[in-house]
Image (cartoon, rainbow, N blue to C red):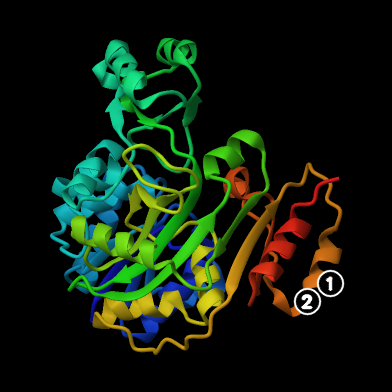
Amino acid sequence: MKNFVFISPNFPEKYWQFCDELQKNGVRVLGIGDAPKHALSPELKRALTEYYHVDSIADYDQMYRAVGYFAWKYGHIDWIESNNEFWLETDARLRTDFNVNTGIKTDGIEAFKEKSEMKKYYAKGGIRTARQIKCSAGLEAVRRFSVDAGFPLFAKPDVGVGAGGAHKIENEAALEAFFAHTPQVECYVIEEFITGDICTYDAIVNSQGELLVESMCVCPPSIADIVNNNLDSTYYVEKKMSENLRFWGRRTVEAFGVKSRFVHLEFFRLNKAHRGLGEPGDFVALEVNMRPGGGYTPDMINYAHNISMFKIWADMIAFDRRTTPDPHDDYYCVFAGRRDNVRYALDHQAMLSKYGEAMMMAPRIDEALAGAMGNQAYIARFRTEAERDAFLADACHRV
């Protein structure tokens, strides 16, 4: 029996479905987290063989003891996963210390943790990506970079999660101010600014590098814009994947040597020609994440394609293959996240009434995610672009 250690299995809450599918596949699911056991959902408790409570996931000694206990009680650990970028280094360190070979170890973490290291792998695969310079090179070097790249520029932490710490730099005065007033500015990277929609390539890859499932999301406002401008959060799963994105997604999987992973790869889809990068509609690589997409993305992929990503993922873990066919019954699945401090033309009940059976979910968003996703979410699916766009217009019509 395989032993799967899941760090913080209660977040996001829907991950109990993955644990349940693992258990059904004969995998022993062992949870470690800082939430008290009584706070776990009944569904998650049933799916876990055992749960080990720690005071803090950030305390490596506690995490080491927890995994050590499971190894002593159940034998060799086969998988250690958190699916959370905050704990990427912890995952890698635990895999190294307990000789777990199904994921990234400490000697390979830089390529997935540091945005500057990702560039080397993109270059190896011949994958187009924005030019970049480390702020540790100094203000004068960045000035020279700006002469060629032009303003605006985009600054972000070399190691970071989501849009935290991101800055759009409009001109040389703003660049000087950024260097003068940003704490630990040497830990940032600066890139040429690219305009376009952010699209994601979401896939599950087995140990042979074979794709078990692929899907595409489109995110018209970026998370950085949503957070910085208090916008409504909207994105959708495409009914059919762009063959151009499929090509570059697969090429990225190959360039990074991805095996036995659920991946979430981010690309820009250019909305105007960009020197050295392409024409409108071309894809430019942005970021690699060795985890599922955040929030409700796995659920939305399920609704869009009438599949269960949680089952396919669990099948990859247990059997290294997919056990369910693709029904080829596809929709657009749309997310709209509203803010409590904004008035909308259609109130909550009106949205639910108008969209009826098309509305798959209407959950409240956890406060920790509200900045990026809004407070009240609506997730619906449609056969046509016109229906999709009408839903987004209704969901985001402010008064």
Numbered badge on residue 353 = 1
| Amino acid on which disc 1 is placed | Ser
In-front residue for pair 282/18: 282
Helix, strand or loop at mark 2? helix
| 233 shown above or below 154 | below
Q: Residues within 10 Å of mark 1 (few under 14, many from 20)?
A: few
Give the left or right position of residue 136, taking residue 188 as reference. Answer: left
**Residue at 37% from the left image edge and 70% from the top image edge:** 50
Q: Is residue 52 visible?
A: no
**Residue at 47% from the left image edge and 79% from the top image edge:** 308
Numbered badge on residue 149 = none
Marks 1 and 2: CB-CB under 8 Å?
Answer: yes
| 48 shown above or below 85 | below
Q: Picture coordinates of residue 390 (x, y %)?
A: 74, 64
Image quadrant in which the C terminus is located: top right
| Amino acid on which disc 2 is placed | Gly
Numbered badge on residue 356 = 2
**Residue at 26% from the left image edge and 45% from the top image edge:** 61
In-front residue for pair 52/261: 261
Q: Picture coordinates of residue 227 (x, y %)?
A: 59, 39
